Image (cartoon, rainbow, N blue to C red):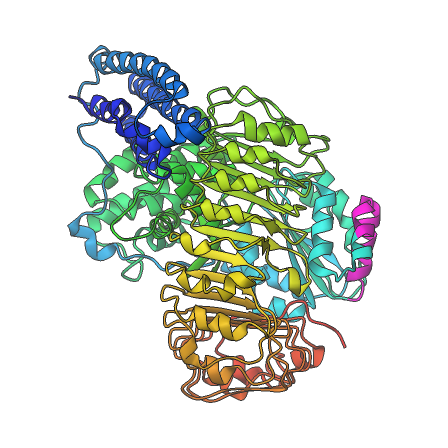
């Protein structure tokens, strides 16, 4: 039996077994059926891999398309069958006899699905027989993609994750740009011009983070523009991020027109020596719409922009800096950093170097092409390099490098389990910085991640993301203590993911003027990026096959009540639903009908409650909701036995409304799968000891008060798997260090109002790596870290400790510290003396600190400069002036 026949028969044969009836009614078991569906997707990915091995063979592509279509048909049949049975489950007397007889609804559904199975089987038979017709009998005999063999094993060491890409060839450019930013008093514009993939953003990010630049300016801000921008949203975001607004002021800002918003920002910047970076401007109209927000006070302020369009730079009357392509030696150095990340980036045997230099020459000095091809070859055996070299046959066209072929080659080289993960990135808007954890949770919900031993799906997803990063298909945007926080994807690679996904009906993206266009009827996933002037977002009823819908509404478009209801009624087979919109004010009860839903995310909303019908989502793995109001969560969530991540948060600044509030007393201790929990005001639920029963909990965020803090710590100490704890609210005092979980690595305290120095207790936590003391967490004037304290601490954040005047650090304390951030500790006089002995410190951020504090850190002449001489990256942004 062929591979296709065996997998299809395995899947469809299950429908004929009596087990399926019990699986539908005994909630949770029917996931076994859907896991078989995921095997179908793996088979399709396998066939796509076979396609990549015979690139250009239309016969293979057509055959793969037929296999994919029948796989999708079978998946639809199974999911529809499950939906019909589950939504018409018997009640009362019928419920009691369901173990012994089929209901009429079930009999009808089984008859319908039987007919569909026969139709699909006939298709499978035709597809299998057509292999000889296409002349591809041997397709699929060599599965998988090749990886590095033993002869090069010593060169295939895992490269460390870095926040910044490798920087080769632009050292002189960097010095020139730093000089243009830091010399002269009049405001002027500096433009960096070059084609996509040439390294404009990488270069200016290096300049932006340069210590000389950070110390020179009082205020630094980075704004990504991209092709699809909305001026009003850009201005609003700036104001919301940097200005303290009362509720009345916020309402006024929301009613302002573009002219008034520009004027407000201009007034804010007038007293500051500022640096504004506008990354990726495409049109002169974009510059004209923003320029008046940046006043010229003749104080050395600067505006820096990147663009592919030289006309934009000339129109802005800027100091033009055009990027060049890399020289041969520079190209080779960059290639070696990516292809040989282990042994000092040195190429092994001569024959491999000769072949590698031929490959690099075909990249024509374009950095993006070099790093992508380097990431591809880093995982290949030497004998495979020649095949890659032969496939690179692109050339210069009208002065630009045709890069699409090399990017496509890197995609086709991905193993089958990574291809859907990469294609899924096309869901996100251009220049969007996506959270790693949310992405991995979506991958898990879609079924892209397969269980591997005792590892969680999230751990498998982290490995997949790291592999895409090491292949240079994804860039790390933010990381902390080795953990990836957020990522971004180059717009050329994003274009590749969208084009490849569209061809396979994997994903369709609608944006700009096409945001409301009807999607293809066979599309499996739909992303709507709405930021234009259209008043409403419109959804279509012609796409019943959708498994995923992501809506990013950055404009003023309403998702009408009827559309919201239709979203939950019309797309019965959804597994992932994500909506980012301030116009979501209520979720309808119809949400409970989406029985296949595994991921539900609603962010930036104005929701005040969740409907009780949400408890019907028995397969839900992730519930992530943010709102401008405190959320009421129904007690019916206790029925979600598959729930792994439960986060309901308020964005308001009031400490009492940080997290959502749970109604009644849901027995969350029944949810054994729960790994992430964010909630507020536990009340009697806490008194009953439910928190201490969540034995698999890894991340916890709760609001506490002095009346219950002792009980909180008493239950938290039982959570052996807990590694991240976020406590908000007043604490009478910290308990002894023995009350903290042994495996705790991440601790955040906010609004704690502790009167005793917390460092005396916290420095004894031997596994603690990240510590955040935020917003009035400590009210004392002095703080001290002893010589043996914090043995593994890597990241320390001190935010808004307004009473803190003196901080002492003894030599030997924090021997592993990498990152220190101090924000708005306005009474702190100076950095501690012992900081000079923390040799591991490589990143220091000092934000919104007094000008006197900053003066002590001025290079060469500052009193405290010697304390931070060894620090590689120093950011002194947003400094107050008084």
**Residue 157 or residue 43, whichever sits in front:** 43
Q: What's the residue at 68%, 67% (across, down)?
A: 878
In the image, taking residue 869 as reference, residue 268 lies left or right, namely right
Q: Quadrant of the N terminus?
A: top left
Residue drawn at the location 70% of the way across and 47% of the way down: 234
Depth check, front residue: 775 or 167:
775
Q: Nearer the viewer, residue 703 or 324?
A: 703
The location of residue 448, given as percent across then percent down, is 36, 39
Query: Residues in magenta?
Result: 251-271
Residue at (41, 24) in percent of width and height: 80
Q: Residue at x 48, y 78 (%)?
A: 870
Residue 413 picture location, percent across and down? 31, 37
Q: Is residue 322 above or below residue 343?
A: above
Q: Is residue 43 magenta?
A: no
Report the quarter where the C terminus lies. bottom right
Residue 660 sits above or below residue 414 on the image:
below
Q: Main secondary structure of the magenta part?
A: helix
Q: Would residue 745 appear left or right of 12 to someone viewing this image? A: right
Give left or right: position of 497 versus 451.
Answer: right
- Residue 252 sits inside the magenta stretch: yes
Quadrant in the rendering for residue 630:
bottom right
Residue 599 in the image: state x and y as whole percent: 47, 42
Q: Is residue 412 found left or right of 597 in the rendered image? A: left
Q: Tell me where residue 556 appears, x and y as whole percent.
A: 72, 38
């Amino acid at each position: 039996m062929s591979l296709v026949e065996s997998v299809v028969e395995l899947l469809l044969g299950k429908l004929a077994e009596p087990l399926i009836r019990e699986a539908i009614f005994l909630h949770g078991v029917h996931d076994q059926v859907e896991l078989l569906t995921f095997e179908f997707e793996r088979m399709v990915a396998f066939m796509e891999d076979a396609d990549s091995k015979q690139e250009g063979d239309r016969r293979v592509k057509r055959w793969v398309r037929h296999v994919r279509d029948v796989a999708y048909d079978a998946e639809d049949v199974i999911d529809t069958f499950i939906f019909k049975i589950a939504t018409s489950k018997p009640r009362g007397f019928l419920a009691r006899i369901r173990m012994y007889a089929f209901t009429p609804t079930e009999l009808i559904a089984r008859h319908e699905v039987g007919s569909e199975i026969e139709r699909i089987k006939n298709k499978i038979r035709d597809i299998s027989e057509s292999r000889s017709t296409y002349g591809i009998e041997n397709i699929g005999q060599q599965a998988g993609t090749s990886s590095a063999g033993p002869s090069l094993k010593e060169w295939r060491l895992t490269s460390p994750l870095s926040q910044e890409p490798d920087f080769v060839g632009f050292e002189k450019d960097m010095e020139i740009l730093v000089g243009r930013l830091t010399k002269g008093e009049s405001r002027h514009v500096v433009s960096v011009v070059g084609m996509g993939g040439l390294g404009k953003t990488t270069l200016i990010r290096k300049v932006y983070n340069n210590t000389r630049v950070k110390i020179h300016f009082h205020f630094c801000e980075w704004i990504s523009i991209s092709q699809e921008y909305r001026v009003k949203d850009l201005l609003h975001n700036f104001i919301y991020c940097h200005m303290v607004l009362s509720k009345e002021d916020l309402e006024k800002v929301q009613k302002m027109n573009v002219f008034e918003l520009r004027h407000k920002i201009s007034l804010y910047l007038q007293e500051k020596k500022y640096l504004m970076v506008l990354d990726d401007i495409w049109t002169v109209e974009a510059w004209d719409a923003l320029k008046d927000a940046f006043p010229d006070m003749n104080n050395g302020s600067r505006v820096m922009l990147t663009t592919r369009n030289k006309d934009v730079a000339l129109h802005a009357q800027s100091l033009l800096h055009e990027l060049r392509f890399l020289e041969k030696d520079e190209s080779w150095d960059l290639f070696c950093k990516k292809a040989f990340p282990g042994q000092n980036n040195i190429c092994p045997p001569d024959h491999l170097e000769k072949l590698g230099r031929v490959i690099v020459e075909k990249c024509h000095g374009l950095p993006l092409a070099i790093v992508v091809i380097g990431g591809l070859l880093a995982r290949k055996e030497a004998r495979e390099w020649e095949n890659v070299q032969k496939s690179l046959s692109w050339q210069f066209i009208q002065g630009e490098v045709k890069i699409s072929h090399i990017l496509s080659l890197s995609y086709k080289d991905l193993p089958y389990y990574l291809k859907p993960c990469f294609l899924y990135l096309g869901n996100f808007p251009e220049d969007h910085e996506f959270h790693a954890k949310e992405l991995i949770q979506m991958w898990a919900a879609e079924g892209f991640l397969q269980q591997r031993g005792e590892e969680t799906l999230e751990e498998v997803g982290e490995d997949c993301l790291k592999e895409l990063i090491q292949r240079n298909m994804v860039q790390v945007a933010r990381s902390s203590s080795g953990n990836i926080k957020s990522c971004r994807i180059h717009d050329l690679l994003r274009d590749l993911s969208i084009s490849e996904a569209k061809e396979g009906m994997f994903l369709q993206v609608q944006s700009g003027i096409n945001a409301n266009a009807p999607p293809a009827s066979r599309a499996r996933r739909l992303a709507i990026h709405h930021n234009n002037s259209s008043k409403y977002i419109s959804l279509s009823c012609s796409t019943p096959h959708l498994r995923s819908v992501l809506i990013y509404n950055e404009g003023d478009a309403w998702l009408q009540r009827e559309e919201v209801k239709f979203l939950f009624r019309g797309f019965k087979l959804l597994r992932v639903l994500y909506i980012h919109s301030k116009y979501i004010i209520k979720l309808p009860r119809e949400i409970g009908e989406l029985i296949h839903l595994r991921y539900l995310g609603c962010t930036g909303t104005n929701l005040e409650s969740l409907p009780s019908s949400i408890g019907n989502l028995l397969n839900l793995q992730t519930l992530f909701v943010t709102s401008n109001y405190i959320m009421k969560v129904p007690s019916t969530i206790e029925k979600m036995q598959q729930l792994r991540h439960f986060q309901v948060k308020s964005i308001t600044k009031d400490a009492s409304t940080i997290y959502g509030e749970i109604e009644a007393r849901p027995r969350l201790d029944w949810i054994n799968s729960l790994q992430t929990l964010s909630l507020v005001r536990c009340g009697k639920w806490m008194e009953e000891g439910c928190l201490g029963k969540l034995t698999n909990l890894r991340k916890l965020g709760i609001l506490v008060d002095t009346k219950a803090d002792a009980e909180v710590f008493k239950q938290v100490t039982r959570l052996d798997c807990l590694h991240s704890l976020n406590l908000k609210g007043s604490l009478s005092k910290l308990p002894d260090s023995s009350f903290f979980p042994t495996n705790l690595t991440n601790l955040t305290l906010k609004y704690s109002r502790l009167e005793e120095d917390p460092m005396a207790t916290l420095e004894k936590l031997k596994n603690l790596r990240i510590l955040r003391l935020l917003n009035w967490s400590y009210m004392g004037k002095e703080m001290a870290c002893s010589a043996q304290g914090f043995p593994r601490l890597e990241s320390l954040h001190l935010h808004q400790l307004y009473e803190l005047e003196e901080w002492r650090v003894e030599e030997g304390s924090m021997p592993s510290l990498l990152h220190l951030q101090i924000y708005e500790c306005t009474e702190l006089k100076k950095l501690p003396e012992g900081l000079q002995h923390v040799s591991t410190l490589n990143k220091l951020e000092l934000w919104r600190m007094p000008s006197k504090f900053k003066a002590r850190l001025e290079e060469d002449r500052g009193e405290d400069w010697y304390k931070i001489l060894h620090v590689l990256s120093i950011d002194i942004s947003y400094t107050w002036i008084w």
